[in-house]
Amino acid sequence: MQRKLIFSIAILFALLPAGCATNPITGRQELMFFPEQHDVEIGRTYAPEIEKQMGGRIDDPALQNYIDSVGQRIARLSHRPDLPYHFIAVDHNSVNAFALPGGYVYITKGMLAKLNTEAQLAGILAHEITHIVARDSSAAMSRQIGINLVLSTITSEKTPQNARMVADITKQIMSLQYSRKDERQADLTGLSYMTEAGFNPYGMVQTMQILQAQQQIRPIEFFSTHPAPQSRIAYLTEEIHSKYYATVKLKVGTEQYRRNVLDHLSN
């Protein structure tokens, strides 16, 4: 009760007129509707419902440990290595990946099945890590859902009505739209993160090419919340040529990905 009371008082301050926060990636002041310390609480509140709606975690500890190890390797080199990151593979056939505030990254079974290398997986995870670091998810919730509504479920008692509200808001969270500016920053900063972590930067370009080919067969969920890949492939390739050309011999991890993911999914 005491913890909830303290957090409720903090919420009151969060609902005061919006202030500014420093984007740790750019160093610029940006409009933000609630303090950073609430990000982890929001993630912790909505993560169980995300997993429930996405079919639960894939029941394979070895696969989960592998996904988490790749994500943690990148996250500890990000601008926010102190966050409690969680990288979770969910048992859903959609081709998608998304992030919650406070360190939660989800990738679907459908997405994992389309990838071929550890570097491609790193590209997806690095992109989502950047959204967390830049607090893009938090800002998108503020704009598209309403921060009062999001925070009210955290402090409310666990009643059936509150559970229904969390379920409804979770559906909106999974369809959050980011600006092109946010997506470009997530691509380019994610490229930097994955390269610093030792992964071949072309993995991110290859991921875009794989998803682009899949999109031509049928619309995929990933592009319902992310921009189309054509321009992204162009500026990522240009960035690699100008900044990371000497890193093209970094880890690809085809065999590691086959052994730790694809073989597990086919069993």
Image (spheres, helix red, strand yellow):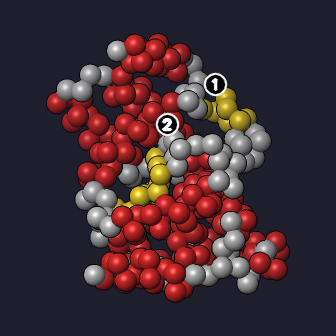
Q: Where's residue 130, x and y in %?
A: 61, 54
Q: In the rendered view, would you say 179 is above or below 93? A: above
Q: Is residue 146 above or below residue 78?
A: above
Percent of width and height locating residue 193: 68, 61
Q: Residue at x 79, y 74 (%)?
A: 244
> Which quarter of the figure is the N terminus placed in?
top left
70 shown above or below 238 = above
Residue with the mark numbered 2: 40
Q: Is residue 149 above or below residue 5?
A: below
Q: Residues within 10 Å of mark 2 (few under 14, many from 20)?
A: some
Of the numbered discs 2 and 1, the one sitting upstream in the chain is 1
Which type of secondary structure does the marked residue at label 1 adopt?
Answer: strand
- Which label belongs to residue 19? 1
Residue drawn at point x = 37 percent, y = 28 percent: 154
Mark 1 packing: few (<14 Cα in 10 Å), some, or many (20+)? few
Q: Quadrant of residue 70?
A: bottom right
